[in-house]
Image (cartoon, grey):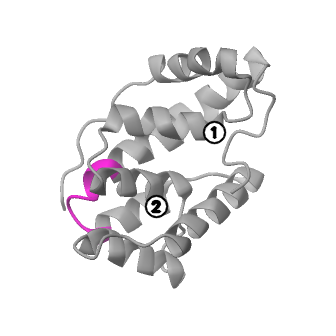
Amino acid sequence: MGLLTFHGDPKSTLELQSWRDSVWIPGVSPAVEKAHSACKIGSRELIEIDRQLDLAGPLAKTHLAAGRQLATNFTAPASESTLLKYCDAVKHGKAPGHFAVIFAARASVFHIPLPMTRAALLFLEMRTAPIQSLWGIIENCLSGEKPTGSLRAA
């Protein structure tokens, strides 16, 4: 799967804080929260959240590549039409396919709570970090978050 959005040195506090404050808190985390809720609403909402997630340069390239891999290589439960339609849109280029959106939607379908979903995604982002510092990094990232509120259907 490769790197997602964190491309720095996980041992560097400055790089971690910079990533947390410029990528995780303003972009990825709100998209995870919205996608987790939208999976219960509809595929159009998931596609719109996916389109709104604005990552640039290598962050976008690796994040999209991993997302498309997740959307195309793993099936959704047949009873989950929202996720199936969204993954189909990713497969056919009608949705960007950000990893965070697909990850959160899949977690929602499997009834994984939002806090656990966020922590799991952070764990994936920081999988190159030394194991003894991993939980501190995850707690640091989660402690800086402000909930964005619930998503309402249009």
Q: Is residue 68 above or below residue 124?
A: below
Residue 43 on image: x %, y %: 30, 70
Q: Does 105 sit left or right of 28 as displayed?
A: left
133 vs 27, nearest the viewer: 133
* Residue 38 occupies quadrant: bottom left
Identified at 20% across, 61% down, the residue is: 41
Q: Is residue 59 above or below residue 120?
A: below
First to last magenta residue range = 36-44
Which quadrant of the figure contains the N terminus?
bottom right
For the residues carrying marks 2 and 1, which lies nearer the camera in this image?
A: 1
Residue 80 on image: x %, y %: 25, 70
Identified at 40% across, 50% down, the residue is: 104
Residue that numbered label 1 is attached to: 125
Type of amino acid under label 1? Glu
Q: CA distance from mark 2 to mark 1?
A: 18 Å
Which labelled disc corresponds to residue 50? 2
**In the rendered structure, which disc, 2 or 1, sits on the residue that comes first in sequence?**
2
Crowding at mark 1 (Cα within 10 Å: few <14, some 14-19, many 20+): some
Quick one: SS at disc 1?
A: helix
Identified at 75% across, 26% down, the residue is: 10
